[in-house]
Image (spheres, rainbow, N blue to C red):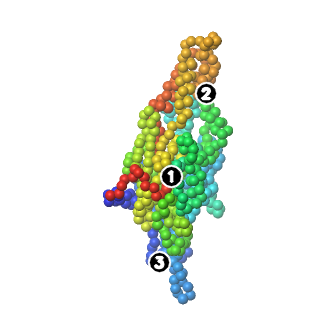
């Protein structure tokens, strides 16, 4: 890698303000034993889509040395501040169905991914979280007109929620301030499909349970199975059937469904005191994990095929501590992975979808040092509605549902039958067939169109509805711009170390 590239990465690191674990040698400068350590503060940086926070990682302090009766030093204890900085993301799943009707409507959920400070799980899985609906936006006029044209008289309202209370298992209740991203009603866990015979065999991954989870979700089926590997809290079939019929209704209530997942970023840091470890326990701190290690991380900024270009920086933060085979801590939570986009193709007309490929080239180690690594994307949690899949090399591709062919074919068939000027063989006019009229109306305007088509008994109405439905289906499924491939901010990632990507730039 050229000196210019390395310098640019160093500047990026400094701008992020990543002050890693520091050891302060003079014991006399530390707080007295038993005194709470001073919390560091976070500063903000300007910029709309740039990092909103610049926070140091947890500090490590030398505690007073213990001595035996002869005055000989026994061991040095290291005091570690357990603090979650501003911007830390909590993954929360809603426990109860909540109607979107009024501002102030209470919501309740639980934490689905443990949150660590250094190597300590300070917010365990299952922690109760409460909040409320804070804003319900009116539907813009253009969207409302478009919805009405398609027989939808209760279009979706954009809303905002916040979470303000954490109920920890030990009985403590913490007041929090959060910024919450839009929720995902159905989350899927996508993983890249390894080449035969090249599955990772090492037991040095960040978490044994997590490693097993990755193996269990490896895709071995068809391409359609790869698009949605493992549904997480997916609704049952009967619930999906009911939701389908409800969605066809012109009037319906809007809810936050049970299991909807939100990413809530802390607006202020949380202090959980400190822990003490010996220097021996931290002797391997900062060592690069072995190849075939999977790091669990979260993406700090969204990466989209619509705006990314080759060389666009990609930064992720380690969310689970990484240990050696001897259970020696190698990387604490908050260590950062720095990489770049190596391939980006935006969505285009004729329903051509976007593509993204990223690699990770450095780990920001404790002390602020950058270590070179070779990391690729092996897994990600995304909304099912994003229609994303990962290829064998970790590339992200937006996909289109294969049902678009069937839907467009049915729409064209209905339009052909409705426009047929002749009578059927038995003397029955196809246009006056209730099935044809209902199908033509549904093709154009859903349930409302079905009712109008059955009531009107008009050739002109059936032809107009079916023609509109066929035209809209052809445009939306084949002529319009495709979907963008988006890796959302705070998305949980699995990053595999040790695989050099063929599209990576060579070092100079």
Look at the picture and state if 166 lies above or below 465. Answer: below
Q: Secondary structure at mark 1?
A: strand
Residue 247 falls left or right of residue 300: right
User: Label 1 belongs to which residue?
Assistant: 378
Tell me, for residue 447, which label it has, or none: 2
Q: CA distance from mark 2 to mark 1?
A: 42 Å
Q: Can you say which quadrant of the picture contains the N terminus?
A: bottom left
Instruction: For residue 490, say whether it is visible.
Output: no
Return the x and y of residue 172 as percentages of the image width and height.
Answer: 63, 62
Front residue of 41/250: it is 250
Return the x and y of residue 52 as percentages of the image width and height.
Answer: 44, 54
Q: Residues within 10 Å of mark 2 (few under 14, many from 20)?
A: many
Q: Nearer the viewer, mark 1 or mark 3?
A: 1
Front residue of 24/399: it is 399
Return the x and y of residue 129 as percentages of the image width and height.
Answer: 61, 54
Q: Nearer the viewer, mark 2 or mark 3?
A: 2
Front residue of 75/48: it is 75
Q: CA distance from mark 1 to mark 3?
A: 44 Å
Q: Residues within 10 Å of mark 1 (few under 14, many from 20)?
A: many
Q: Secondary structure at mark 3?
A: helix
Residue sitting at x 44%, y 48%: 357
Residue sitting at x 42%, y 63%: 371
Instruction: Work out which residue is located at the far bottom of the displayed protein and give it.
Output: 70
Front residue of 366/380: it is 380
Tell me, for residue 27, which label it has, or none: 3
Q: Earlier in the sequence, mark 1 or mark 3?
A: 3
Q: How many marks?
A: 3
């Amino acid at each position: 890698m050229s000196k210019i590239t390395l310098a640019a990465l160093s500047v990026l690191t400094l701008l992020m303000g990543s002050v890693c674990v520091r050891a302060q040698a003079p014991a006399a400068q530390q707080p007295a034993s038993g005194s709470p350590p001073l919390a560091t503060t976070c500063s903000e940086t300007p910029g709309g889509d740039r990092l909103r926070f610049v926070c140091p990682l947890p500090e490590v302090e030398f505690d007073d040395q213990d001595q035996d009766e002869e005055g000989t030093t026994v061991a040095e204890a290291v005091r570690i501040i357990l603090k979650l900085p501003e911007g830390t993301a909590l993954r929360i799943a809603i426990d109860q169905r909540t109607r979107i009707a009024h501002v102030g409507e209470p919501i309740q959920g639980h934490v689905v991914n443990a949150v660590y400070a250094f190597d300590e799980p300070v917010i365990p899985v299952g922690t109760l979280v409460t909040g409320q609906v804070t804003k319900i936006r009116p539907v813009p006029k253009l969207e409302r007109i478009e919805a009405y044209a398609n027989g939808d008289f209760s279009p979706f309202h954009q809303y905002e929620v916040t979470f303000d209370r954490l109920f920890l298992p030990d009985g403590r209740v913490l007041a929090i301030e959060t910024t919450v991203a839009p929720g995902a009603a159905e989350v899927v866990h996508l993983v890249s499909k390894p080449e035969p015979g090249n599955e990772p065999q090492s037991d040095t991954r960040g978490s044994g349970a997590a490693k097993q989870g990755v193996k269990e979700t490896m895709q071995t089926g068809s391409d359609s199975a790869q698009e949605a590997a493992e549904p997480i809290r997916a609704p049952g079939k009967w619930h999906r059937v009911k939701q389908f019929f409800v969605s066809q209704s012109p009037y319906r209530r809007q809810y936050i469904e049970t299991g909807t997942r939100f990413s809530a970023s802390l607006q202020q840091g949380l202090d959980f005191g400190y822990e003490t470890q010996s220097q021996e326990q931290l002797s391997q701190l900062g060592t690069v994990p072995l190849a075939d290690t999977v790091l669990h991380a979260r993406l700090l900024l969204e990466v989209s095929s619509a705006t990314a270009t080759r060389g666009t920086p990609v930064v992720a933060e380690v969310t689970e501590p990484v240990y050696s085979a001897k259970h020696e801590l190698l990387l604490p939570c908050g260590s950062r992975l720095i990489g770049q986009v190596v391939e980006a193709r935006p969505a285009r007309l004729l329903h051509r979808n976007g593509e993204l490929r990223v690699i990770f080239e450095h780990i920001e180690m404790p002390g602020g040092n950058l270590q070179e690594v070779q990391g690729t994307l092996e897994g990600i949690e995304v909304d099912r509605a994003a229609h994303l899949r990962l290829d064998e090399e970790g590339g992200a591709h937006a996909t289109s549902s294969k049902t678009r062919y069937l839907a467009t074919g049915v729409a064209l068939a209905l339009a052909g039958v409705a426009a047929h000027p002749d009578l059927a063989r038995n003397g029955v006019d196809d246009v006056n067939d209730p099935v044809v009229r209902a199908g033509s109306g549904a093709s154009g305007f859903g349930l409302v169109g079905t009712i109008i088509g059955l009531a009107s008994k008009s050739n002109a109405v059936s032809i107009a509805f079916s023609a509109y439905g066929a035209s809209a289906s052809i445009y939306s499924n084949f002529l319009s711009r495709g979907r963008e491939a988006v890796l959302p901010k705070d998305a949980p990632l699995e990053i595999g170390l040790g695989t050099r990507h063929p599209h990576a730039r060579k070092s100079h």
